[in-house]
Amino acid sequence: MEAFKMDSKQYPNQEQNCHDGLPAGRDVQTDPVGYGNSPSREPLQNAGRRTYGERRMLKGAAGRAATDADRAQTYGEQNAQRRVSSDRDGIADPFGNSAPQGMHFREEDHTEYSSGRPEIPGSHFAGGEDAEHRANPPKAAGRPVNSQKKPSETLPEFEAVDGDAGAQSKTQKKKRSRFNAVGILMFFLPWRGDSVFEAVRKIIFSTALVVVGICTFLISSYYIDLYKAKQEYQEIQRQLEETRANRSFKTESYTEDPQTGEMFEYLEYNDIANKLLSQNPDLVGYIKVPGTLVSYPVVQKKSKDVTVNMNDYYLYRTFHQEDSKSGCIFMDYRCHFDEVHEHRRVVDNSGNIFIYGHNMNNRTMFGSLRDYVSNPYFYSEHPIVELSSCYNDYVYKIFSIFIVDGEDYESEYAFDCWNTLEFPDEETFYWYVNEAKKRTTVNTNVDVEYGDPILSLYTCNGLCPNAKLILMCRQLRAGEDPYEGTENATLNENVLYPSAYYKNGRPVNYDPSKFVPYGPKS
């Protein structure tokens, strides 16, 4: 109890003659109302006060000691983290200065300290030893040990201090992520220590995974490309839908030349040209097969050198000349179709106009023409083809639907119909249309006469390798019924197929004696 007696120097106003910490001869009133205020209770009251004071002084001293110890420990941990970081980075000084070799710090235990004074209100760190601890907190947990002292060495190297929880946590996370990546690679790729079976399995699995990824990319790219092309042509169709619905078909009109008195066909742009020619100067017309998906602009690419084949230009380009597997419907570069200068036709139209288009799986472009093969009912419902130039509108009737080999030029079954665009005489004309009739899969009653302009639609077919589907049409004559001869179509059982069709062991069932040719009317 002597350790907690009051100091006269610290409390000068207190009287020195006291008993158990209380002034002598002075009654301390503990019962302000006056009950039980007898001298016999004074020793008990004084003992209670001493106990209360002792508890308060112990509590203050312990609290301050714990606070100072916590502060010292926190400060030491911060310095330890700096030393660990500096040691890992190869830097001795945490402030960025290099340190000489041979300097090490060893870790020491923190020492908890306390001023040992009781807690007095308003006196924390007011001066003395507490002020020293406040102004000069404990050093970091570690002191330098210089194994090679040199005058120029001012900053020591730090030895890594254990217990850096934050840094260790980050390091563990990095290691864990690295191990996860390595584990994934080890699952897919052969690794040291793998058995032969395991290595082969990994190689096969990785190769299959790469192949599947490439195939997925190519397939998705293909269908995305088809979708974009379809959207482009649907927009063009939308632009022309109202225009075509509100106009009548324009036929040939002749005007007299005021200077020569000669009658000539006066040609001027129609609504199709006004709508689309500004979007693509290669536009030559618009084709539509009523009742099918065929409704597209027709382009033609020509070179200054007429001998240069330009048919492949729009093979994989859309109408707006963007790369696409769908391509565009295009006319053979050798054909002439309403070529006009100053409202006059400068050259007659070709006797046989060839138009090409892809047979797309989504039935766009000429993909829907496959429905005509060996299907007389479909033909009877859709026998008409409408073809408009930038000046005139033309209507054609389909008279032959056949398949040829696009690579066969020499066999007895060969028919390179795409290379005959003009008919110099009647014999050539009838030979050509009869070759088409021999191969037709649908018998029609549409008659064909010399002088009828021919239109041929060309696309791919899967009947045999290099198979090409041709729909051959003739132009509607003036005053003729568009559906005359198309109603009673039948399936042709006497068909001459291309040579590739018979290579698979199929018998040649064509009988020339059963063929009824076209010819001049007697």
Image (cartoon, rainbow, N blue to C red):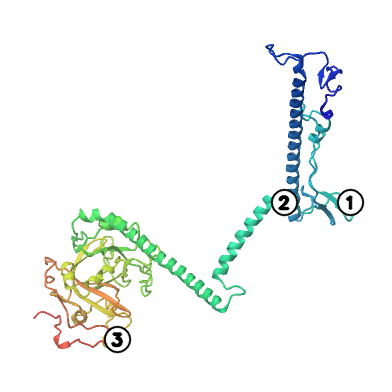
Give the mark nearer the N terminus: 1 vs 2. 1
- List x then y, in percent, for residue 59: 73, 31
- List x then y, in percent, for residue 89: 74, 55
Seen from the viewer's position, the closer of residues 425 and 434 is 434
* Discs 1/2, front: 2
- List x then y, in percent, for residue 27: 78, 13
Kindly indicate the quadrant of the structure image that contains residue 64: top right
Seen from the viewer's position, the closer of residues 516 and 118 is 118
Q: Residues within 10 Å of mark 2 (few under 14, many from 20)?
A: few
- List x then y, in percent, for residue 315: 36, 69
Seen from the viewer's position, the closer of residues 323 and 163 is 163
Is residue 160 among the parts visible in the rendering? yes
Whether residue 40 sits left or right of residue 199 in the image: it is: right
Whether residue 183 sits left or right of residue 415 in the image: it is: right
Q: Residues within 10 Å of mark 1 (few under 14, many from 20)?
A: few
In the displayed structure, would residue 481 be above or below residue 423? Answer: above
Seen as rendered, the residue at the extreme top is 34
| Residue located 25% across and 75% down the image | 470
| Amino acid on which disc 3 is placed | Asn
**Residue topped by disc 3:** 504
